[in-house]
Image: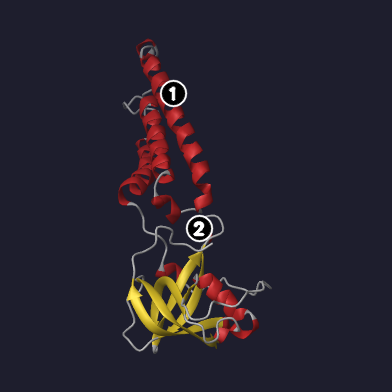
Amino acid sequence: MSNRAQAFVVLLFGLVLLRLAVSDLLLRFVRAGTRPLVLVAGTLVVLLGIWSLVAAGRGDDRADARPSSSDAHGHSGASRLAWLAVLPTVAVSVVGPPALGAFTAGRGTRSATLPTGQVFGPLVEGSTARLSIVEFAVRALDHDGRTLVHRPVSLTGFVVKPLSGGFLLARLVITCCAADALPVEVQVMATATAPAANEWVRVTGTYAGQAPHNLPVLTATSVRPVPMPSDPYDR
């Protein structure tokens, strides 16, 4: 790989970072709070790539005066395998890998939710409370879910797998990036046919206690498909 080609790869990588920084695709990999850092990093890498291209162009003017670095068989010093470094960059830019989903949540890792000691206020009577799966699961651990009893709630998440009489609903929680994602799960009891794995749904229902391993249970009154949110992870 020539110096010019290396500079081009650096420039391409910087442009991909900038594309991630200004789009919701970034949220499939890291927390939203990292956006300014990715934007700065992408800008610096683009500037480095441009500087490298200029430097490579100047170096080409003096290349003929130097002895060739090829060996007796005509092979250049840089391996062609270096071009493989371009493939991940192109994949992220063109394909746009999907967010983690049912496969990650179903690998046997237990729910990331633990008792926090947080004191929750009562939910508003007479209306359906739209909660994150994390808040619902933590409220369920607080004094046996006293703030959830007889209160209709609405949860949005993806289907992990069908269960007897319902399905497993989940949302992945990340601390820094998708590499540390852990699932928070809710067992949904529903009479209708379970949606397919990885399908995003909004479930309305009432709290119905806990299954083994502190898994909260929701008896569904409504299950409807929804688009995957721009930010698919809980925090």
Image disc number at residue 51: 1
Residue furthest top in the image: 65
- Mark yes or no: residue 163 visible: no
Q: CA distance from mark 1 to mark 2?
A: 33 Å
Q: Is residue 115 placed above or below 99 in the rendered structure?
A: below
- Residue 143: x and y in percent read 65, 83
Query: Residue 65 location, x and y as percent?
Result: 38, 10
Circle 1: element type? helix
Q: Nearer the viewer, residue 186 or 7?
A: 186
Q: Which residue is mark 2?
A: 179
Type of residue at label 2? Answer: Ala
Tell me: residue 110, above or below residue 149.
above
Of labels 1 and 2, earlier in sequence is: 1
In the image, residue 34 lies at what x, y percent?
Answer: 52, 48
Q: Secondary structure at mark 2?
A: helix
Question: Amino acid under label 1?
Answer: Trp
For label 2, count other residues whose C-alpha is less than 10 Å away and answer few (under 14), some (14-19) or many (20+): few
The answer to whether residue 98 is visible is yes
